[in-house]
Image (spheres, rainbow, N blue to C red):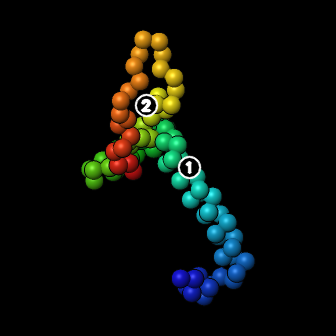
Amino acid sequence: MLAAPREYSDEGQIAGIVAVIRPFGFLNRWNDAMATPLEADPVEVGEKHLAGMGRRVGKHARTSSWHLYAAPRAGRARPRACRCSDPTF
């Protein structure tokens, strides 16, 4: 697996590359688990380029599932199901 990078880089350089990439993997998983809402620009780009392939914002829309964790306001019932189970991009 690491044979190709070792042809062009030494161990220190490979460790540096992994050290830069690894936090982005963590942030990707964190944002997915927390259903972090996307800003307007990424949503527009996704809708423009990915909507035709069946992809949608899903749980990362501005109206995210955080309403499920907050106490309901007086006179309002807690939603029964969240729409967040849709596939996301």
- The residue wearing badge 2 is 63
Whole-Å distance between the Cαs marked 1 and 2?
18 Å
Residue at 56% across / 59% down in the picture?
A: 25
Q: Which mark is residue 67?
A: none
- Residue 61 visible in the shown view: yes
Quarter-of-image position of residue 44: top left
Report helix, strand or loop for mark 1.
helix
Residue 15 position within the rendered picture, expressed as x and y whole percent measured from the top left: 69, 73
Residue at 45% across / 44% down in the picture?
A: 42
Q: Amino acid at mark 1?
A: Trp
Quarter-of-image position of residue 14: bottom right
Q: Nearer the viewer, residue 5 or 36?
A: 36
Residue at 35% across / 37% down in the picture?
A: 83
**The residue positioned farthest toward the top in the image shown:** 75
Q: Nearer the viewer, residue 75 or 53?
A: 75
Q: Amino acid at mark 2?
A: Thr
- Residue 44 visible in the shown view: no
- The residue wearing badge 1 is 30
Report helix, strand or loop for mark 2.
loop
If you read the primary sequence from the N terminus, does the residue marked by circle 1 or circle 2 appear first?
A: 1
Residue 73 position within the rendered picture, expressed as x and y whole percent measured from the top left: 48, 16
Residue 63 position within the rendered picture, expressed as x and y whole percent measured from the top left: 43, 31
Q: Are marks 1 and 2 in contact (CB under 8 Å)?
A: no
Query: How busy is the neighbourhood of tag 2: few (under 14 within 10 Å), some, or many (20 plus)?
Result: few
65 on left or right of 17 = left
Rendered view: 50 above or below 58: below
Residue at 49% across / 38% down in the picture?
A: 37
